[in-house]
Image (cartoon, helix red, strand yellow):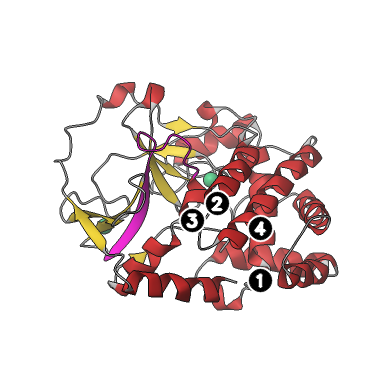
């Protein structure tokens, strides 16, 4: 699915969709004093419902319409699966305190003992999806996953979290495994409250689960103009100063790229020192942006950035 779509996007780029550099204001001119900034924004339990609606809206007239509609159905199934998790073990108060003291994520993808209920969520998601219209390849993957034993599913989750061994991962299965783990982790963070989590020693990792960010989002409303990194797993958002590389902390050599004629609500923030970029979404340009939906729908920007030799740093557990 991804392969064919990418090549179509590349050719569109060659037909004149160029990347443009955007002039940048200096660091420090747009931030509120640190004491007034909420460090953490916890997600709502209806994240997947909102995401599904956003994906359906983005699919209209999009080159990747079928894929976005599939992800909309997947997000809808994730929302359904949330009702499975009522009696799941959460970290004890002491555990949370110890993690805050040591700058560790209490629900770390490697440290936290996953409840097997995430596999029930997976089966629920697969059953929900099967009932609707699906591409043949997705239907075959669902059938295969339904026959996969528990130990193999756990290994697939481990491989997904390891990240650096992408070739070991069954790519067709990745969106389904990722979706079930996202649903389980969203359930873990939502009842705990923002006070449960502290700042980590590595500030670009999610304070709740330790994942590297998917994108960053510049907020509107009470947090107007503040930039938050978004977790690809648990959907927690945590504050990061703007116009500063989130990975190496430099404020020099930060450049913003967008697609000419494309949405003003999404740019790639690149760092000269890292030779990498993270996408940044602007809610003042489009209040309906969703981290995952808009990340996937703007894959043309990733293609153009890759052609320029700048490496994607954002993590996405669905593709
Ligand atoms: Zn997280
Ligand atoms: Zn950097």
Contact between marks 4 and 3 (CB within 8 A): the answer is: no
Question: At 17% across and 35% down in the image, what residue appears?
Answer: 28
Q: Earlier in the sequence, mark 4 or mark 3?
A: 4
Relative image position of residue 186 (x, y in whole percent): 63, 41
Earlier residue among tags 2 and 4: 2
Looking at the rendered structure, the secondary structure element under dot 4 is helix
Q: Residues within 10 Å of mark 2 (few under 14, many from 20)?
A: few
Q: Secondary structure at mark 3?
A: helix
Q: Quadrant of the N terminus?
A: bottom right
Label 4, on which residue? 70
- Chain-order first, disc 3 or disc 1: 1
**What residue range appears in magenta?**
275-290
Front in this rendered view, residue 168 or 75: 75
Q: Position of residue 177 (x, y in %)?
A: 68, 60
Which of the numbered marks, if any, corresponds to residue 60? 2
Q: Is residue 210 visible?
A: no
Dot 1, crowdedness within 10 Å: few (<14), some or many (≥20)?
some
Q: Which residue is mark 3?
A: 297
Q: Quadrant of ligand 2?
A: bottom left
Disc on the earlier residue, 4 or 1: 4
- Relative to 301, say whether 289 is above or below: above
Q: Going from the N terminus, do you reach mark 3 or mark 2 first?
A: 2
Tag 2 secondary structure: loop
In the picture of the structure, the residue carrying the numbered disc 1 is: 172
Q: Residue at x 52, y 66 (%)?
A: 163
Rounded to the nearest angstrom, the CA distance separating label 2 from label 1 is 24 Å
Marks 3/2: CA–CA distance: 11 Å
Residue 47 - label: none
Mark 3 in CB contact with mark 2 (< 8 angstroms): no
How far separated are the C-alphas under marks 3 and 1?
19 Å
Q: Quadrant of residue 160?
A: bottom right
């Amino acid at each position: 699915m991804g392969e064919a779509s990418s090549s179509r996007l590349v050719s569109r780029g060659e037909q004149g969709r160029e990347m443009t550099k955007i002039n940048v204001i200096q660091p420090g001119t747009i931030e509120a004093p640190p004491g007034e900034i909420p460090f953490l924004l916890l997600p709502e339990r209806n994240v997947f419902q909102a995401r599904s609606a956003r994906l359906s809206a983005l699919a209209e007239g999009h080159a990747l319409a079928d894929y976005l509609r599939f992800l909309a159905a997947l997000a809808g199934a994730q929302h359904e699966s949330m009702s499975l998790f009522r009696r799941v073990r959460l970290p004890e108060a002491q555990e949370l305190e110890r993690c805050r003291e040591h700058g560790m994520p209490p629900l770390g993808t490697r440290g936290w003992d996953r409840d097997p209920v995430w596999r029930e969520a997976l089966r629920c998601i697969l059953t929900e999806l099967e009932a609707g219209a699906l591409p043949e390849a997705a239907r075959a993957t669902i059938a295969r996953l339904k026959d996969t034993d528990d130990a193999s599913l756990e290994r697939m989750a481990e491989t997904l979290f390891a990240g650096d061994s992408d070739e070991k991962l069954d790519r067709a299965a990745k969106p389904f495994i990722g979706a079930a783990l996202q649903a389980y982790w969203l359930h873990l963070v939502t009842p705990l409250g923002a006070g449960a989590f502290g700042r980590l020693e590595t500030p670009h990792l999610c304070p709740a689960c330790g994942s590297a960010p998917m994108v960053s989002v510049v907020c509107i409303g009470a947090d107007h103009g503040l930039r938050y990194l978004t977790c690809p797993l648990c959907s927690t958002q945590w504050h990061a100063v703007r116009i500063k590389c989130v990975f190496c902390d430099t404020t020099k050599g930060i450049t913003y790229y967008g697609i000419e004629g494309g949405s003003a609500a999404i740019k790639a923030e690149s760092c000269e020192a890292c030779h990498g970029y993270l996408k940044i979404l602007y809610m003042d340009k489009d209040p309906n942006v969703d981290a995952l939906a808009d990340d996937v729908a703007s894959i043309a920007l990733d293609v153009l950035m890759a052609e320029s030799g700048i490496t994607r740093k954002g993590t996405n557990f669905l593709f």
